[in-house]
Image (spheres, rainbow, N blue to C red):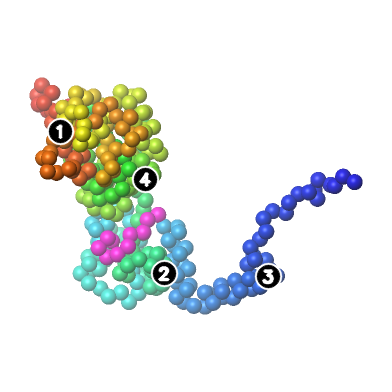
Amino acid sequence: MVPKRRSLRGKGPTPKSEDRTWHKAYKEKLQREKRMAANPYLAAKRRGDERRKSAEEIIIGRNACLEALRTPMAVKRLFLARGLEKDDRIDEILALASKKGIPIMERDRGEIESMARNKAHQGVLLEAKSYEYKDLGEVIENCASPLPLFVAADNLTDPQNLGAIIRSAAAFGADGVIIPHRRNAGVNAACWKASAGACAFVNVIRVENLNFALEKLKARGYCVIGLDGEGEKEVGKTGFELDPLVIVAGCEGKGISRLTRTKCDLEAKIPIEDKMESLNVSVATAIALFATVEARKASSPQGQNI
């Protein structure tokens, strides 16, 4: 007798023991949930877990929150632990939050601890909005500069270095800073602080793959210069200064990755004393931007930026 096809079908994965209504583990789960609901501290921690999961970014601690509020960073809410002992930092945090119209919410300490993942929060948290990165294609299309200039960060892990690079990009009129989505620092509170607010008006572009982005730019006539201590030429003297340009800065320590090097038209160096091995990546990027801008000015008949 041939079995019916329906009888051969599987019944799917076996449910967990705590999901089977007849199982001992299910009853234990119900009792555990009742205890959590009756315990104010556990209930507060549960609320904190739910809020943390829905939050875009959580900034933890008095100093970090104060520095974030001093920047134009978009903040949703300020959370304070009940019974918080105030000091000068708390007074300034409250004053800045009130001035910016940020809702101030007092919460049980258990909820604060859960939101902070039990890190040293000092009774203060900020829920901030995620930074809105720009689209590379849109920035290129809308770029009004006759000689566009971009900086690309390759596996840069320190958000303070990224912030300093964004600040230099603003100072020297670069059209944007390009960062990869993975294995690279993003725009967070530390980056905002280091940029001195430049994150608010510099085009920070996040791409899925930096090498594909560089190929896209090269196809549109851009030249790509990688910064390296053993480079062939000096920054500002590469011969590509009068072309649309992308300056690539590598990660702290290892420099530009092997694959990204293959996308560079040239590697440029900054001459320094032999007793010093290298420069900080943000300092090197600032010097490269300055040298590029100066070379462009020197090529202009009026000595003006072009």
Nearer to us in this view, 36 or 233? 233
Q: Secondary structure at mark 1?
A: helix
Instruction: Name the residue type under label 1.
Output: Ala
Q: Name the residue beneath numbered marker 3.
A: 23
Separation of residues labelled 4 and 2 (CA atoms): 31 Å
Write down the region rendered in magenta.
56-65
Instruction: Name the residue type under label 3.
Output: His
Separation of residues labelled 1 and 2 (CA atoms): 51 Å
Q: Name the residue beneath numbered marker 1.
A: 291
Q: Is 132 located above or below residue 96 in the figure? A: above
Q: Nearer the viewer, mark 4 or mark 2?
A: 4
Q: Name the residue beneath numbered marker 4.
A: 183
Tag 1–tag 4 contact (CB < 8 Å):
no
Residue at 38% over, 43% down: 181
Instruction: Name the residue type under label 2.
Output: Glu
Residue 135 figure quarter: top left
Q: Secondary structure at mark 3?
A: loop
Residue at 63% over, 63% down: 16
Q: Nearer the viewer, mark 3 or mark 2?
A: 3
Separation of residues labelled 3 and 2 (CA atoms): 32 Å
